[in-house]
Image (cartoon, rainbow, N blue to C red):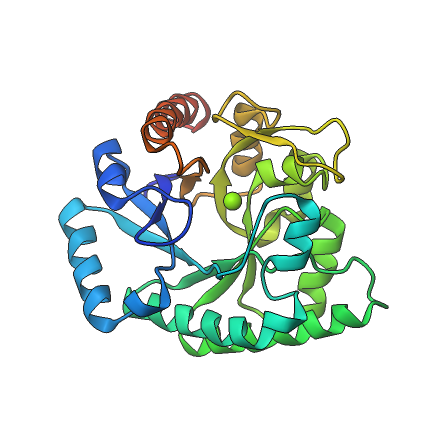
Amino acid sequence: METWPIGVFASIDAGLGVKLEVARELGVPTIQLHAPAAATRTPANARAFLARLADAGIRLTAVFGGFEGESYADIPTVVRTVGLVPRETRAARTREMKEIADFARLLGCDVVALHLGFVPHERSDPLYGEILDVTRDLCDHCRKNGQALHLETGQEPADSLLRFIGDVERPNLFINFDPANMILYGSGEPIAALEKVGRFVKSVHCKDGTWAARPGQEWGAEVPLGAGDVGMENYLRTLLKIGYRGPLTIEREIPQEPERQKTEIGQAVRLLAELKARILPQ
Ligand code: MG
């Protein structure tokens, strides 16, 4: 299979991705998909979507779960609302995440991913054990479907993430590495983090960002690929070094400006193609 096929993060009716038509116009060979809303996760819709993918010559490489009520407004709001960490919504969201995994199976996709939320950094925190349990439960469900579960990075420093994955003790738990999130959340220098967690990285986002004045307390800014503090050439060289050969999935999270989103993703596709040509052994 081709090394580093370029991809984009796509949506059907939920999430921050681009429409499939945009992916097609951009000429990318892969997408990751934000799971559609519950009402539209039907076998008939799965078949119809598969037909559209086949027609466009696009391969689906991961399905991302997301939930109603999540907000990325600021860091405290993420802690309170995102993923499987908040107790009030955990049981319902875990059920929904399993339904999303089953929908992904209908799409023939063997990777399911999500933002778990802010996992406590201390093992002594009672919440830590609860998140271990729910992650094991989800991994076991995915494994029955023949799927891996990928955790989106961002909220945890690399060492915390490694310890958490080790403690979950499931063979199908991996990482979707997002270098910009490390900067946006202020959780560590992304290249050093990638080197540390590299053996678990099975999918990646190509997204860029700039550090906040007070990292970890306020958001950094998400910016067009190549315009931020990640350092895209260094990022790709590090991916090569850790042995990552999978898709490079571009994220640009400005769905409120679809024209600008499409333009900037188009520029990102060209940037990645240039860097691939320079970096990959011929
Ligand atoms: Mg991401």
Question: Is 52 positioned to the left or the right of 109 in the image?
Answer: left
Corner quadrant of residue 265: top left
Residue 135, visible in the rendered structure? no
Q: Give coordinates of residue 255: x percent, y percent.
A: 40, 38
Which residue is depicted at the point 54% across and 37% down? 239
Which residue is depicted at the point 68% across and 71% down? 132
Location of residue 45 with respect to 176 vertically, above or below:
below
Residue in the foreground of this view, choosing between 29 and 38 = 38
Which residue is depicted at the point 75% across and 26% down? 213
Question: Is 243 positioned to the left or the right of 246 in the image?
Answer: right
Question: Is 176 positioned to the left or the right of 194 in the image?
Answer: left
Location of residue 77 with respect to 100 vertically, above or below:
above
Q: Give coordinates of residue 226: x percent, y percent.
A: 50, 22
Q: Give coordinates of residue 125: x percent, y percent.
A: 83, 67
Location of residue 141 with respect to 123 vertically, above or below:
below
Corner quadrant of residue 186: top right
Residue 164, visible in the rendered structure? yes
Q: In this figure, what is the number of numbered marks?
A: 0
Question: Is 81 positioned to the left or the right of 243 in the image?
Answer: right
Q: Quadrant of the C terminus?
A: top left
